[in-house]
């Protein structure tokens, strides 16, 4: 989602293989077509972002810098939908507590507010959206 939102030319995650040579080639082709700025999103746990930036710069001769975003910087300013959703989720959580129901995780699934036992929620796996990643690759210039 972040990669699409910021117009990243590449998104590097642990779920899909990546090739820094191919990324450098993609950047150089885009530069030849007039693109001047490039964003590469590197997910946590991939490796040293500073080292990746250094390698990209060596391969492309395009000045590269890594910016490590903190938790506050990642989200940006809440939208109206963000604020309404936070209120709805909080309301549901309070209703559960008023009923004497605790140890729940409240969230959204298929546009519905849901809650799960905390242990069940911790064991859930969130599948990586490969199709969304591929869409981002296709539209990246």
Image (cartoon, rainbow, N blue to C red):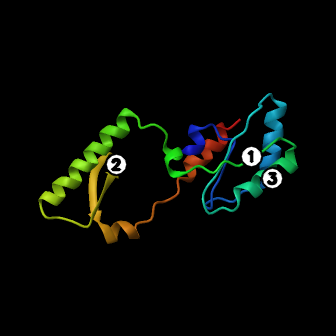
Residue to which mark 2 is pinned: 110
Q: Nearer the viewer, mark 2 or mark 3?
A: 3
Residue at 79% across / 35% down in the picture?
A: 30
**77 lies left or right of 32:** left
Decide if residue 98 is on the left or right side of residue 132. left
Q: Earlier in the sequence, mark 2 or mark 3?
A: 3
The crowd level at tag 3 (other Cα within 10 Å; few <14, some 14-19, many 20+) is some
43 w.r.t. 77: above or below: below
Q: Which residue is mark 3?
A: 54
Q: Residue furthest top?
A: 34
Q: Secondary structure at mark 1?
A: loop
Callout 2 environment at 10 Å: few (<14), some (14 to 19), or many (20+)? few
The percent coordinates of residue 87 (x first, y second) are 27, 43
- Residue that appears at 70% across and 55% down: 49
Q: Secondary structure at mark 3?
A: helix
The answer to whether residue 52 is above or below residue 60 is below
- According to the picture, the residue beneath numbered tag 1 turns out to be 65
Query: In terms of image quadrants, where is residue 116?
Result: bottom left
């Amino acid at each position: 989602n972040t990669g699409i939102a910021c117009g990243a030319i590449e998104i590097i995650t642990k779920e899909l293989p990546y090739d820094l040579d191919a990324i450098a080639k993609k950047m150089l082709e885009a530069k030849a077509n007039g693109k001047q700025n490039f964003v590469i999103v590197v997910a946590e746990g991939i490796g040293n972002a500073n080292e990746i930036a250094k390698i990209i710069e060596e391969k492309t001769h395009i000045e590269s810098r890594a910016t490590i975003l903190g938790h506050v910087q990642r989200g940006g300013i809440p939208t109206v939908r963000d604020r309404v959703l936070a209120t709805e989720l909080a309301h549901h959580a309070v209703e559960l507590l008023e009923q004497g129901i605790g140890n729940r995780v409240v969230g959204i699934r298929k546009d519905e507010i849901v809650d799960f036992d905390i242990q069940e929620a911790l064991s859930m796996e969130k599948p990586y959206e490969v199709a969304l990643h591929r869409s981002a690759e296709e539209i990246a210039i």
